[in-house]
Image: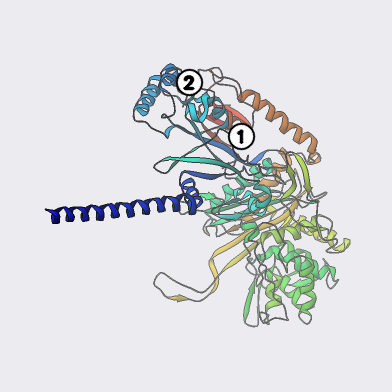
Amino acid sequence: MAIQKKGILAKFFLVAAFMTLFLVIIIFRIFNLQYVHGDKYKKLSTDLTFKEFTISANKGNVYAADGNLLATSLSKFTIRMDLVVVEDNVFEENITALSIDLSNMLGNTSNYYEVKLRNAKIAKKRYYLIAKNIGYGNYLKMKKFPIFNLGVYKGGFIAEHKTVREHPIGKIAERTIGYDDKRGEAGIEGAFSDYMKGEDGLRWKQKIAKNQWKPINDINEKEPVDGHDIITTLDVNIQDITHHALLRQLEYFEADHGCAVVMETSTGEIKAISNLGRTSEGKYYEKRNYAVWESDEPGSTFKLASLMAALDDKVIDTSTVVDTEKGKIFIHGFKVEDSKRGGYGEISAARVFEVSSNVGIVKLIRKHYDNKPEKFINKLEKYGFTKPVGFPIKGEGIPFIPNPKNKQWSKISLEWMSWGYGVSVTPMQTLMFYNAVANNGVMVKPRFVKELRRQEKLEKTFKTEIVNPKIASEETLKKVIKILHNVVVKGTAKNIYSSNFSMAGKTGTAKKYIPQHKNEKGETIRGGYSSKQYIASFAGFFPVEDPKYSCIVVIHDPKKEKGYYGATVAAPVFKEIAQKIHTTTPIDIQSVDDKIHFTSIDNRFLNYNSQLNKTYTEIPNVKGMSGMDALSLLENIGLKVKVSGIGKVKHQSINKGEKLVKGATIILNLS
């Protein structure tokens, strides 16, 4: 018996010792967690349940020169509700009123919302979706709804903010306006991204369930500061004209792509730029900024540089006679041929240019520069062809001009260069050169931006930048302007002549060089000039007497069966642009008064805000409002909006005074 008691006692002490040891370990772990590693685990707990979220600042707006919005950031909100924090008595007293307000704003019946919210309350939903993508005006109104007006902790009101980038004039000039997002940096927005970004804000959120986070407070820890505005040189009216003139021609000729640019002669301001590429379905969109990016053989538009160099060096005159023979010559085994079968015979240098004789220009340049090609290359450098223009926009094409000093030079380089082959330049370089001729020899750098503004205060002005104060003598300039005018009057572009207003310019038609490639069968095809693919172009200015605008049109791969010459494909686009600018934009009132212009913006903004704060039961009248303001106003009162055109509202599909039905679609036609 004593032995049995002794055994029991031993087991008791063993258990007691084990429990004591276990208790010591627990106390040690508690002490270790609380005091030794306490800060670490507190931080870990906080990190798991609380998190700092970035609130992206709105980018600055992009404006046209006349104040029209080209790109802007709109605030959009997703509204959710935490039904657990709403007390039962508060919910029952206000659920009907809340449902009525939601019905008036969002469109469904009040009974629909009441049933949904009651079911969500029963299910203890903490992140219940109320509405997505509502505008800022509706967000402010919704904050004042019953229950929601109690805030986050008592009313369960959760608002998630995001910004959406919108282009009020649609896809027009989209590539030049550009973007700065996951796609990269492009156009004006990409070039000035640091200036436009602003400063992001901060907001703390708490994790509630299933990786869902709700804001801790109604206010942000740090409010975002919006970015700065860009005032571009673009004119919405001229842009619209240019875009549609180019688009119509591309569609008719089923071309692969093309570009058209309008530049103000004296300032270098780009008033319009359109770059359209073809999809596999035959539609066109702003695919790439071809005018800035694409460097190709220009063809006969380059002959102006050749003629002007020879005239300025006084090795020829406009009356110098050259024998174009029978329209065909061979140089070192390579053929140079005129488009006119049989050639033009003996004609003057001026007529060589007017009829675009390849043989004539090659013979003139070969005779006077064959032994001193460096002198000719120096002229091309003076004309801005040997280096990029130097745009802030990324992706500018690199020109190529052969030089006797490098290995690319061959025994036919000079001759081929004289008629626009064997060289590579961008449309913007060619335009800058033609613009300098129109601008009395002063070469100005093309530019897209006028000003940078912060909260409507002017911070920086971009002034006209002179690249070359005089590219040629007065005598030479007068001669080439006369010849360029004659191209339209009695030369290759006589098909676009108008007695109502004067134009000057040069057609260009170049066979496209196709690099070595493999065909569908996997066979290697040698590189060479295509007999099916062409580049049609026209560069010039108007009016001739006092040039206000220069313009270039370049169209790639028009359907050969319909036409491929510059006179047929590109020149009509130039004429349409010039004619419509002449008739719709009186040249003598082109200047823009910035004070008036920005006062006008302020007035429209105040008028828009006053309308936004009204409570609507009927459709408002938005005729005459800018498309962007009308779009925002109508969306904020619960309508779905479809927009056609650009500019101001000309027609609305639902007349003013009709009963407002939330969720209905209204179509706006803009002028």
What residue is pinned by disc 2?
101
Image coordinates of residue 500 in percent, x first then y, are 75, 43
At label 2, the amino acid type is: Asp
Looking at the image, which residue sits at the far front? 2
Residue 347 picture quarter: bottom right
Residue 613 placement, left or right of 151: right
Report whether residue 513 is seen.
yes
Circles 2 and 1 in contact, beta carbons < 8 Å: no
Numbered label attached to residue 628: 1
Q: What SS does tag 1 mark? A: helix
Please tell me which residue lies in front, 646 or 544.
646
Report whether residue 282 is seen.
no
Q: What SS does tag 2 mark? A: helix
Residue 242 placement, left or right of 404: left
Please tell me which residue lies in front, 612 or 548.
612
How many numbered circles does the render carry?
2
Q: Residue at x 80, y 36 (%)?
A: 595
The alpha-carbon separation of the residues under discs 2 and 1 comes to 27 Å
Image coordinates of residue 242 in percent, x first then y, are 65, 46
Is residue 12 placed above or below 524 in the rendered structure? above
Residue 239 picture quarter: top right
Q: Residue at x 84, y 56 (%)?
A: 440
Please tell me which residue lies in front, 25 or 530.
25
Looking at the image, which residue sits at the far right? 474
Numbered label attached to residue 424: none
At label 1, the amino acid type is: Met
Mark 2 vs mark 1: in front: 2
Q: Residue at x 84, y 73 (%)?
A: 315
Image coordinates of residue 255 in percent, x first then y, are 54, 55
Residue 659 placement, left or right of 478: left
Image coordinates of residue 254 in percent, x first then y, are 52, 53
